[in-house]
DNA sequence: GATATATTTACTACAATGTAGATTAAATGG
DNA sequence: CCATTTAATCTACATTGTAGTAAATATATC
């Protein structure tokens, strides 16, 4: 076993969302944030399933919030990234950066498709 | 359907390896490159399966090389990244960068674990 | 205070990706 | 030709990604 396993891309993204949202990181906020910043629209189910898995793996920790909702609704579950989660994120970032090394420029000029070819 | 689907992290990495290796991008080279640059060791099977899928999705294109091996051995299959592949890579990079935005610094100071807690 | 309604999480099932071990293919050297 | 080397394919299963539906729980209303 490689011991330090890699995390999936969506998992990475959700960890980052939680970090960014700080004290306001719960389900629907996270979902909106992801859609807004990364143009990635998840269904409710997809979101919570992944959040749950991250918690089980110890990369996120969740605690139920008080019943302080303005309107109605069930209690929110607030998430925060654990030390292990931060480490996982950092490793993924490093790996990707190594592979992108010196490649950014060669990529852009090739973007000439996108529909109309004539 | 969201039309522009996201690719997995390993898929990203393999596409990047192929770009980096240019005219020398075939199985075992890619595998070595990945292990070297990103500390990610794949089994032979894991590698080729993913390469094959990328080809099927049109993100990679492969062509069999001549029988120019120095020693013995089967013909190599050389890969190159298609325009669609470059586009997919670019999108993933953009999304991740958006989410990392302004976060890099807050991460480093937290790296104090790693074994001894006392 | 019973019930409609809003907000949020949990459950269930399936598709796509990630992973590896064993096998096959094809070339060279003796 | 047979052992050896190099490389790719096959088969099977684990992990992640995804979504639809249901359940929980608060407020509003009459």
Image (tube, coloured by chain):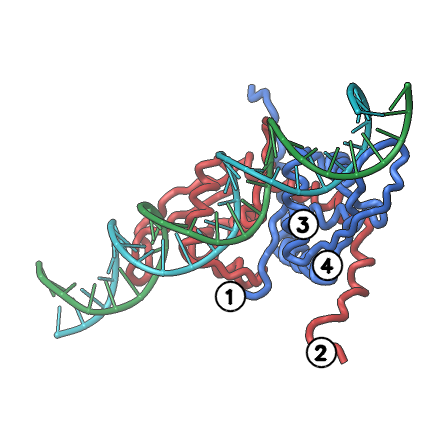
Chain colours: A red, B blue, C green, D cyan
User: Label 3 neighbourhood size at 10 Å, few (<14), some (14-19), many (20+)?
Assistant: many
On residue B12, the disc is: 3
Residue B118 location in percent, x, y? 56, 19
Protein chain holding label 1: B
Identify which residue is drawn at 54% across, 46% down.
Answer: A11
Q: Is residue B31 above or below residue D27?
A: above
Q: Is residue B41 above or below residue A67?
A: above
Q: Do the dots labelled 4 and 1 sit on one chain?
A: yes
Identify which residue is drawn at 61% across, 53% down.
Answer: B7
Q: Is residue B2 visible?
A: yes
| Residue assigned mark 1 | B1
Q: Nearer the viewer, residue A34 or B62?
A: B62
On residue A34, the disc is: none
SS at mark 2? Answer: loop
Q: Do the dots labelled 2 and 3 sit on one chain?
A: no
Identify which residue is drawn at 48% across, 43% down.
Answer: A80
Residue D21 location in percent, x, y? 30, 58
| Residue assigned mark 4 | B86
The image quadrant of residue C5 is bottom left
Residue A76 location in percent, x, y? 36, 51
Residue B94 location in percent, x, y? 67, 58
Q: Nearer the viewer, residue D13 or B115?
A: D13
* Label 1 – label 3 distance at C-alpha: 21 Å
């Amino acid at each position: 076993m490689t011991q330090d396993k890699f995390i999936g891309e969506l998992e990475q993204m959700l960890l980052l969302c939680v970090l960014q949202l700080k004290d306001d990181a719960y389900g629907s906020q996270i979902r909106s944030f992801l859609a807004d910043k990364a143009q990635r629209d998840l269904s409710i189910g997809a979101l919570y399933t992944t959040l749950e898995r991250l918690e089980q793996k110890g990369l996120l920790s969740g605690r139920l919030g008080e019943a302080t909702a303005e309107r109605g609704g069930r209690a929110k579950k607030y998430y925060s990234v654990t030390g292990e989660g931060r480490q996982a994120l950092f490793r993924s970032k490093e790996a990707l950066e190594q592979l992108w090394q010196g490649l950014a420029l060669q990529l852009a000029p090739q973007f000439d498709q996108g529909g109309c070819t004539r």
